[in-house]
Amino acid sequence: MLSLVRSLWEVFRHGFHKRVTVQYPEEKPYLAPRYRGRIILTRDPDGGERCVACNLCAVACPVDCISLQATEDETGRRYPEFFRINFSRCIFCGYCEEACPTYAIQLTPDFEMGEYNRQNLVYEKKDLMVDGPGKYPDYNFWRVAGVAIGGKDKGQAENEAAPVDLHSLLP
Amino acid sequence: MINLYPLLIIAVVLFIVLNLAAGLIWVERRLLALWQDRYGPNRVGPFGLGQVLADSVKLFLKEDWIPPFADKGVFILAPGIIVATAILSFAVIPLAPGFVVADLNIGVLFLLAMSSLGVYSVVLAGWASNNKYSLLGGIRASAQMLSYEVFMGLSLLGVVILAGSFRLTDIVEAQRKVWFVIPQFPGFVLFLIAGVAETRRLPFDLAEAESELVAGFHSEYSGMKFGMFFVGEYIGVILISVAISLLYFGGWLGPVLPPGLWLAIKTMTFICLFILMRAGLPRPRFDQLMSWGWKYLLPLALLNLLVTGAVVLALS
């Protein structure tokens, strides 16, 4: 019986506590930097597209909301011809970000994506692309990858030794 | 020339009671939110008061659906009974000295009779819904009402012995020297418990028990019929709070402020206590409810009555 009175008293004291509600539209909640919100495609520090159209994000996506087509420019650099995310399907699990080998696809702390028309939730490449490197400011995939593209031959990447001519390795 | 004064009193009482009952929806939601560190409805109008209006408009416009398997006549009748009996009980409640619709000399008995007639509404609703959960809720309500009605009346008799009258006005006037809550403290606690059980509010809402019985007796109700159950419940809460203030806390007696305001303050305090109990207490099992009622509370009420009677007899 006394415990009932005690719990009533405890609940009554909560009337003088600070309220935890965030008055949302006027007052924005704090979202962590690694919050999984709207998906973006980022660029190199040099300004080039990071995405190499490897399709790993589309494979990792559990709801199949990512669709893209790979192509190559004249210098041998791969990039997506189109890149489409259907946000009416996306569940913001972040698997695409984990799968991405080049840090191109990233999730951001933004969730205010409401639309009146369902079709408007399908984001094309121009909607996804941003002008910055996102969470990884110094990373440049093409500068560390051992792939030859225009303006960078084999052996010219960071921490990469020049290629060895096998035929000259005589005893 | 007929005397219009009683009609005026009836109109004022109805106006106060019905508006308060509607407003309590907002009060309860805001208070529950306060005690749960939330805000509750605060968007519509000043302090969210427009929520009352929005809710009532919504309830009125909802489809008033009667399930094809229900017993139609009884199904429609049931929500009316609870509101009618709850409002009728206010006929004997004096809101200020002389401001009463019918100052019956058996006011307390009328009050008890009307508030316990309200259980017919719940039982009939459960029966007419033709739904096993509703029926279980109705059966629970009737069993609960039987066991708690008994000592509700008995706990009141201590007050009646001290005041020497069943008339509510006399009972209040008898508290000029000391409020009855002091000589009748056990009676007050018992009446409070029985009152909560009588209105089927948490922690005694086993007739609804949404975690076990969907929504109990009103599972099949929608629209304004459902709203009537709500209004009836809130009127019941007001009724029990007014009754507690009148019987144990000196009703309108108090210094400085006008009598009606004193009664309003006391009543609001008890309404808040009702809501606090909903916020803070868990629901007991049904067998616990029954065994408390019959094994502890009823003997306590009888003992309280016996001691009060003996003391009054010895002093007279």
Image (spheres, helix red, strand yellow):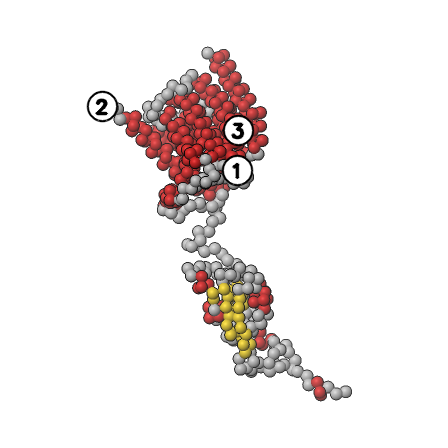
Judge the density around disc 1: few (<14), some (14-19), many (≥20) Cα neighbours within 10 Å: many
Q: Which residue is mark 3?
A: B143
Q: For the residue marked with disc 3, what is the amino acid?
A: Ala
Disc 1 is placed on an element classified as: helix
Which of the labelled discs sits on residue B1, or is there none?
2
Do discs 1 and 2 share a chain? yes
Image height check: is A88 above or below B42? below
Which marked residue is nearer to the observer: mark 1 or mark 2?
1
Q: First in sequence: mark 2 or mark 3?
A: 2
The Cα atoms of the two marked residues, 2 and 3, are separated by 49 Å
Judge the density around disc 3: few (<14), some (14-19), many (≥20) Cα neighbours within 10 Å: some
Q: For the residue marked with disc 2, what is the amino acid?
A: Met
Q: Locate residue A106, reporting x and y percent.
A: 53, 66
Which marked residue is nearer to the observer: mark 2 or mark 3?
3
Q: First in sequence: mark 1 or mark 2?
A: 2
Out of B76 and A123, give the one closest to the viewer: B76
Disc 2 is placed on an element classified as: loop
Which of the labelled discs sits on residue B133, or is there none?
1
The quarter of the rendered structure image containing the N terminus of chain B is: top left
- B201 with respect to B16 (left or right): right
Out of B295 and A110, give the one closest to the viewer: B295
Evaluate if marks 1 and 2 touch, with contact meaning CB atoms under 8 Å apart.
Answer: no
Tell me the residue at 48%/31% (across/down). B123
Q: For the residue marked with disc 1, what is the amino acid?
A: Tyr
The Cα atoms of the two marked residues, 1 and 2, are separated by 54 Å
Image height check: is B67 above or below B291? below
Do discs 2 and 3 share a chain? yes
Q: Locate residue A155, reporting x and y percent.
A: 63, 81
Numbered label tally: 3
Report which quarter residue B110 is drawn in. top left
Q: Chain of mark 1?
A: B
